[in-house]
Amino acid sequence: MIEVFFLGTGGGAPSKKRRLPAFLIRKQGLSVLLDCGEGTQYTLMQYRLGINSLKIIGISHMHGDHVFGLLGLIASMGLLDRKETLYIIGPKNLKDFLFTSFEYSKFYPQFKIEFINSYEDDEIKISTFKTCHTVESQGFIISEKDRVKIDDKKLKEEGIKDWRIIRKLKEGKSVEVDGRILHPEDYLIVKKGIKVAYTGDTSPCQSVIDSVKGVDLLIHDSTFLKEPSAYTYGHSNASDAARVALEASVKLLALTHISSRYEDVSMFLKEARKIYNSTILPEDLSYIVLK
């Protein structure tokens, strides 16, 4: 199970209804923040989402609406006496940006900050992919690892109750029972892990389509409704995001990074659903659970 919290779904500048980009992904105690627009720490505190529970922060690119909240968030972590290492995945110049700011502000975190290119543990993997913006940019894929479990129903039907036999099958070992060989592949079920992809800012492009194929949730740039200039600024229209979702055969598309110029956003969903029906338009502070 993966929880996705849409903390900020606007872009460029905040509006009365939409904050700047920030997405919290949680799985069994692991908290990952993707992008950190200005004010993100207030949202995390206000809704008790746990600033110091964040283990990994991913920054898609260095434009201010995606990164200006990071300094304040890290400073608050320090004031809250954080001890655990904070892992950051971001553009190559993010480290200089942070540590130069620390130097000028005379703030020095008392916890370790480690810059990494990817992350992996027993449960989850986080990787990046190239996106198509006007500056160096990357998207993120958070992949839950496949899980293997025993087919209890089949074992029950065949009258197999001996825990020693079941344990060996779980370990991938064949077992002889009453002259018959039981093979593990006949009694194990593979549950495919959930995948979430986030593009950050991007024009529609093949590298994104290739990278997000088949994901359970695609959070895609949808800055504009019908603006030819979207591509000049390295962004997408709602219909572009829908075409990417269609070509990549994703299960669910979430439109985000909505420009503050739009007060009525109902047409975003209508335009996208003409092309890809499995589309949602999350509001700030909404969340979904993927199982």
Image (cartoon, helix red, strand yellow):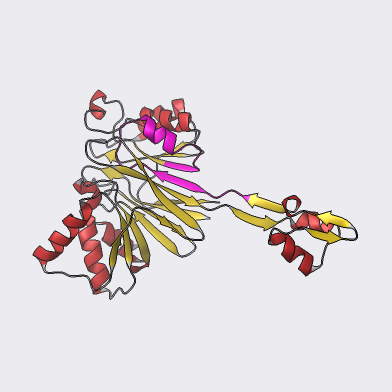
Taking the image as shown, residue 69 lies to the left or right of residue 189, namely: left
Taking the image as shown, residue 233 lies to the left or right of residue 248, namely: left
Q: Nearer the viewer, residue 288 or 199?
A: 199
Q: Quadrant of residue 44?
A: bottom left
> Residue, x 24% and y 50% (percent of image)?
92
| Residue 94: x %, y % from top left | 22, 53
Relative to residue 279, is residue 171 depicted above or below?
below
The segment highlighted magenta reads: 191-218
Relative to residue 88, is residue 278 depicted above or below?
above
In the image, residue 198 lies in the stretch drawn in magenta: yes
Residue 48 in view, yes or no: no
Residue 172 in view, yes or no: yes
| Residue 5: x %, y % from top left | 40, 53
> Residue, x 29% and y 47% (percent of image)?
60
Q: Quadrant of residue 261?
A: top left
Taking the image as shown, residue 14 lies to the left or right of residue 125, namely: left
Q: Nearer the viewer, residue 74 or 126?
A: 126
| Residue 229: x %, y % from top left | 23, 26
Q: Quadrant of residue 30?
A: bottom left
> Residue, x 37% and y 34% (percent of image)?
207
